[in-house]
Amino acid sequence: MPVPESFRTAYDEVLGQWPGPVDRADLQTPHGFTRVNSCGPATAPPLVLLPGGGATSTVWGACAAAGLARHHRVHGVDLMGDAGLSVPRPGRPVRSVDDLAVWLDAVLDGIRSASPDAGPVLLGGHSYGAWIAAHYAARRPERVAGLVLLDPTRVFTGLSPGYVLRALPMLARPTPGRIRSFLAWETGGAALDAAWLRLQEASAGFPAVRPVRGPLPDPAPLRTLSVRVLLAGRARCHEPGRVARAVAEMLPGARTEILPGVSHHAFPLAAADGIALRLG
């Protein structure tokens, strides 16, 4: 399906907020071409970031501009089959956690081809992207120098039933109005970046794709890694204190912090300074 022009315009507008120059690459994988947007010193340690469901790699521009791109080579990835500029291969949808691991193997291989001397990557993700990152790290710990989980969903606890019920109409039949209304509710009416909000609304033009479902990641392999968990203090998708307690039980060595005053969906934008400060 061709990318809607309104989406591409909004995508480029948000990408224009990244600290330049930004390198754009379409990396070949068994499941199709994956768009990766990168910035920061070419010789800096690689930081690979996966967005939440319905978001795109462009959401990481605020964190990059807040300082991450001074200390890391930041690689933002458009998820395969989700809104963005990644192009799925016909007949090869990503349907399982194993598919996600094979897909991300190829993405990391493509990123490494541009920096052959780079070692394991610092891998991070927000929300659903954090779930993917945690599953990948549990399967391929040798490829991960460290794991950064930003308000992760379904990694340590399940979703709040009230949040799921509120999101269902938007997920079942997304429209710009439903997306706008849901984000206003989830963020408590907080002021949102206008360009990012236009991009979120434009994502309603994409065909609905079910995210990969699966169990919570196996915590045992993650205990060998450096893991940092940052939680949104005003998240409605789960209770942050409960998540923090689950992290302490499952990964006693992880560093966990709740950032007050920010919601789940706006987390990479509203908490960009705090994220950059802690990861820089």
Image (cartoon, rainbow, N blue to C red):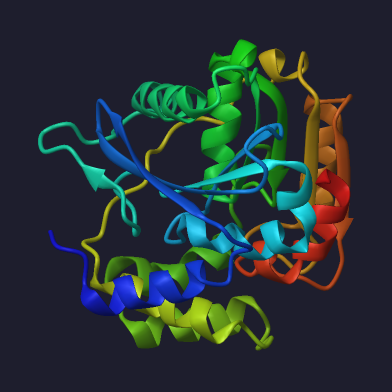
In this rendering, is residue 22 above or below 155? Answer: below
Residue 215 located left or right of residue 5: right
Residue 228 located left or right of residue 128: right
- Quadrant that contains the N terminus: bottom left
Rendered location of residue 184, percent (x, y): 57, 85
Rendered location of residue 153, percent (x, y): 60, 47
Query: Which residue sits at x=83%, y=46%?
Result: 280
Query: Which residue sits at x=55%, y=25%?
Result: 115
Rendered location of residue 97, percent (x, y): 41, 27
Query: Which residue sits at x=25%, y=32%?
Result: 31
- Residue 236 in view: no
In this rendering, is residue 25 above or below 4? Answer: above
**Among the 4 quarters of the image, the one containing residue 48:** top right
How many marks are shown on the rendered structure?
0
- Residue 43 in view: yes
Residue 130 located left or right of residue 164: right
Rendered location of residue 147, percent (x, y): 70, 31
